[in-house]
Image (cartoon, rainbow, N blue to C red):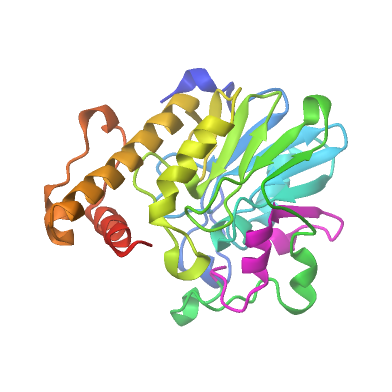
Amino acid sequence: MRRSIYLGTLTFFGIVMMATGFEARQERSSLVVHSLSDNLYMLANATGVEGIGSGGNTAIFVTDGGVTLVDTKIQGYGQDILAAVRTLTDKPVTTIINTHTHWDHSGSNTEFPDTVQFVAHENTRRNMASEDCDDGAGFQGGSIKNCQAFKGANARYLPQTTYSDTLTLFSGVDQIDLYYFGRGHTDGDTFVVFREARTMHTGDMFARPGLPFVDVPNSNGSAVEFGETLKKAIAGISGVDTVIPGHNPVPLAWSDFVNYSGFYNDLVMQTQAGKAAGRTVDEVVSSYRVPSQFSGNAAPPDRVRATVQYLFDGQ
């Protein structure tokens, strides 16, 4: 465990209540708060939680004017997030940034007060407002193309503030910089940088050390562009030491993010070389091995195949 890059674990939530919807089929996940600086925290699934757990990692940032959150996990975890906030500060949640559309990162948006300002990339807002966005509402019915979370009266929870390339929120020690570098996991992935804390939330552009899920069919993600987007982020962002990944149970280091980019782009190069040599998808997949310098990154066979197939198809 990389204990040196964060200050420590503050508190632990052991929650075994059952809920409705998606969560009705699983025991609610235990959550843990990692302290990254005097006013920045990562709310994550406890180590050892199986599957998706509570959803993506939530950043809790306590500013002079209130609390800013990054991502709100799956539906039904809004009160758990607020309970975690209350252990840290009495200030209200004033701002929520969504790194992208997906239901496991925006599922509890509607469980916060109407006074909260929601912020996201313009493509993410468009996806959230569309008729077929992937918010998880259709999982019980067997389809993920059934977006109801932000319809009707709940449209008020759509992001009110959007941006195209960069956006700065607040100033001084409270400054947060948002960056969009292109398509990847979706077509609206935001990198969130907390300047004073030298920390970045990557959303699912770096979910964990391993091949990513690329949502080509539902959110216009791109396996072809994913690697270039990672390269642009590394070139365009400076002054970061610590990374809050989309799903990893503990914070990681900037060097892990750089290594992950090399790992993904190496698979792109191997696939391109194989295709140019006339090899098939099956041949490229069966011959692929993770290079030793990227051995900390997982490459499950299903993810290798999906990524290689998208690259062959130019998607």
Instruction: Give yes or no for residue 41 being in the magenta stretch.
Output: no
Q: Is residue 128 left or right of residue 245?
A: right
Name the residue: 80% across, 46% down: 93
Q: Residues in magenta?
A: 109-136
Instruction: Give yes or no for residue 133 being in the magenta stretch.
Output: yes
Quarter of the figure that contains the C terminus: bottom left
User: In the figure, 134 relative to 246: above or below?
Assistant: below
Name the residue: 45% across, 55% down: 52
User: In the figure, 67 relative to 144: above or below?
Assistant: above
Image coordinates of residue 48 in percent, x first then y, are: 40, 42
User: In the figure, 77 relative to 176: above or below?
Assistant: below
Q: Is residue 61 left or right of residue 189?
A: right
- The answer, for residue 96, to whether it is visible in the render is yes
User: In the figure, 304 relative to 39: above or below?
Assistant: below
The quarter holding residue 38 reads top right
Give 5 or 163, whichever is nearer the viewer: 163
Q: Is residue 250 left or right of residue 11?
A: left
The quarter holding residue 196 reads top right
Q: Residue furthest bottom?
A: 141
Q: Residue furthest top?
A: 4
Give 119 or 57, whichever is nearer the viewer: 119
Image coordinates of residue 272 in percent, x first then y, are: 25, 50
Q: Residue furthest front?
A: 276
Quarter of the figure that contains the N terminus: top left
The quarter holding residue 198 reads top right
